[in-house]
Image: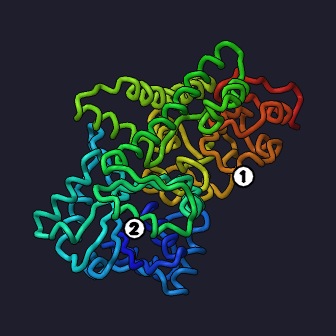
């Protein structure tokens, strides 16, 4: 099929190149000319495992391109995806400005029967709104179908998730339109669910918010473990063995961040409010997540006697490993607190340092973890990059002023840290004191 994808962010670009890999003729659209030129030259504007290699291959095979004109991309298409940002407002309500602009532009340029697919995360009822734009623009009812197909891509594994999805959801008023989307993705042979428009819109919120709830639940339990002497890893393992619960999203840590869970939890609270329901459970989930990071920073500050005049090494800046995305990263919370109370920060991340420089231009950016540790009063692991789990702890400790390690992602085994001479603090278990005379 001939496909257009409006938007070249994490969702739009990945969706476009994977649809091209499935054999379709794909045109992506972005109004940023520099970004368009970059992508057309084979350079991905975002860090995502496997994306740049796939992009180059699809460009070489001439099944994928990026242009700046929505009109030129959509006129002759069978399917048009809307994959633009919907950032939350102050009350959590998603901002649909970009969706509205794109929908109106598509409406002005439809020349043949077209399926318009909303891939952006939007409130329930947005499909009806997009349909009204089409009607107001004079598009005949038999010329357009609106479909909601929420994305379930995880940053860091987005390409793999798009190539082998757990499921695909298509919500439409006419079943025939949803069937066309089934045909578009037929080569993927994954479970596909056809539902009504509004149910599809709610499925994305419902899924992400449930995962957020699991994370906040295990993090709340981790606080109890720290006080009573239990180990949250063992608690989570025992819980996860129950197939009704499952082991996924039971890794205690600093809480969730990124572009999806913060936005979607606030979004669903807002959606519920619009329909007259006070979603107190989800509000508590959000509160636990915010408290988790602050409690961790409180522990660091208390242990080293305040941040003023101290040097803190921060390992990890992205909100999670395998991405350069710093949106709602817990590292930003940690750094901001240190700087505001008079501390100094030395930081390293394999992919996200350039993005972080826009937020914190004056901290010291390092080339590796060992450089971060130089004369540090403590080192804090904030992001679960694999390379941090394999650090030579003896070498790390030798560079530090004080061998104090705060592991916010439970990457290091406590006994290894202790053997290397560290006082080890983490989430969900009590502090492990260093062994006297070790690590030298």
**Contact (CB < 8 A) between labels 2 and 1?**
no
Residue at left offset 70%, top offset 46%: 374
Indicate the secondary structure of the residue bearing disc 2: helix
List x then y, in percent, for residue 310: 59, 35
Residue 180's tag is 2
Eye-nearest disc, 2 or 1: 2
Give the residue furthest to the top: 228
The vertical placement of 371 against 221, above or below, is below
Quadrant showing the C terminus: top right
Which quadrant is the N terminus positioned in?
bottom left
How crowded is the residue under tag 2: few (<14 C-alpha within 10 Å), some, or many (20+)? Answer: some
**Left or right relative to 207: residue 106:** left
Mark seen at residue 430? none
* Residue located beneath label 1 in the image: 387
Q: Toward which corner of the image does residue 78 lie, by quadrant?
A: bottom left
Q: Nearer the viewer, residue 224 or 189?
A: 189
Q: Residue at x 59, y 21 (%)?
A: 221
Q: Is residue 40 visible?
A: yes
Q: Is residue 111 left or right of residue 339?
A: left
Residue 174 screen position, x and y as percent: 29, 59
Say which of 357 and 232 sits in front: 232
Residue at horizontal 60%, vertical 45%? Answer: 383
Q: Horizontal and vertical percent for residue 336? A: 46, 39
Along the line of sight, which residue is nearer the eye, 81 or 386? Answer: 81
CA gap, disc 2 and disc 1: 44 Å
- Position of residue 436 relative to residue 347, above or below, is above
**Label 1: which secondary element:** helix
Percent across and percent down for residue 246 are: 64, 34
């Amino acid at each position: 099929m001939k496909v257009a994808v409006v938007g070249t962010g994490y969702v739009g670009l990945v969706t476009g190149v994977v649809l091209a890999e499935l054999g379709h003729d794909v045109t992506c659209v972005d109004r940023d000319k520099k970004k368009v030129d970059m992508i057309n030259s084979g350079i991905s504007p975002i860090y995502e495992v496997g994306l740049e290699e796939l992009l180059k291959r699809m460009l070489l095979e001439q099944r994928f391109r990026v242009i700046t004109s929505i009109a030129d991309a959509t006129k002759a298409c069978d399917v048009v995806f809307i994959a633009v940002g919907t950032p939350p407002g102050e009350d959590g309500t998603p901002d649909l400005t970009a969706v509205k602009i794109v929908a109106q532009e598509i409406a002005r340029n439809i020349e043949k029967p077209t399926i318009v697919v909303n891939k952006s995360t939007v409130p329930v009822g947005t499909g009806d709104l997009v349909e009204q734009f089409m009607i107001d623009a004079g598009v005949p009812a038999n010329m357009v179908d609106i479909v909601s197909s929420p994305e379930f891509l995880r940053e860091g594994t987005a390409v793999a998730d798009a190539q082998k999805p757990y499921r695909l959801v298509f919500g439409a008023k006419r079943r025939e339109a949803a069937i066309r989307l089934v045909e578009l993705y037929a080569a993927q042979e994954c479970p596909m669910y056809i539902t009504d428009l509004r149910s599809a819109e709610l499925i994305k919120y419902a899924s992400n918010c449930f995962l957020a709830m699991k994370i906040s639940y295990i993090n709340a339990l981790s606080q109890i473990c720290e006080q009573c002497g239990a180990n949250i890893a063992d608690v989570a393992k025992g819980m996860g063995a129950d197939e009704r619960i499952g082991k996924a999203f039971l890794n205690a840590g600093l809480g969730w961040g990124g572009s999806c869970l913060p936005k979607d939890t606030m979004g669903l609270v807002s959606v519920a409010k619009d329909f007259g329901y006070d979603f107190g459970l989800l509000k508590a989930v959000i509160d636990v997540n915010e408290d988790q990071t602050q409690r961790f920073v409180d522990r660091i500050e208390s242990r080293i006697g305040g941040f003023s005049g101290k040097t803190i090494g921060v390992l990890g800046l992205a909100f999670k490993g395998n991405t350069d995305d710093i949106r709602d990263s817990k590292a930003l919370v940690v750094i901001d607190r240190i700087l505001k109370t008079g501390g100094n920060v030395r930081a390293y991340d394999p992919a996200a340092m350039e993005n972080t420089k826009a937020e914190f231009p004056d901290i010291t950016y390092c080339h590796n973890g060992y450089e971060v540790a130089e004369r540090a009063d403590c080192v804090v692991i904030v992001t679960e990059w694999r390379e941090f789990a394999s650090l030579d702890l003896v070498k790390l400790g030798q560079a530090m002023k004080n061998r104090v390690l705060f592991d916010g992602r439970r990457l290091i085994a406590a006994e290894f840290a202790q053997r290397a001479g560290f006082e080890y603090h983490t989430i969900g278990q009590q502090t492990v004191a260093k062994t006297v005379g070790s690590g030298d």
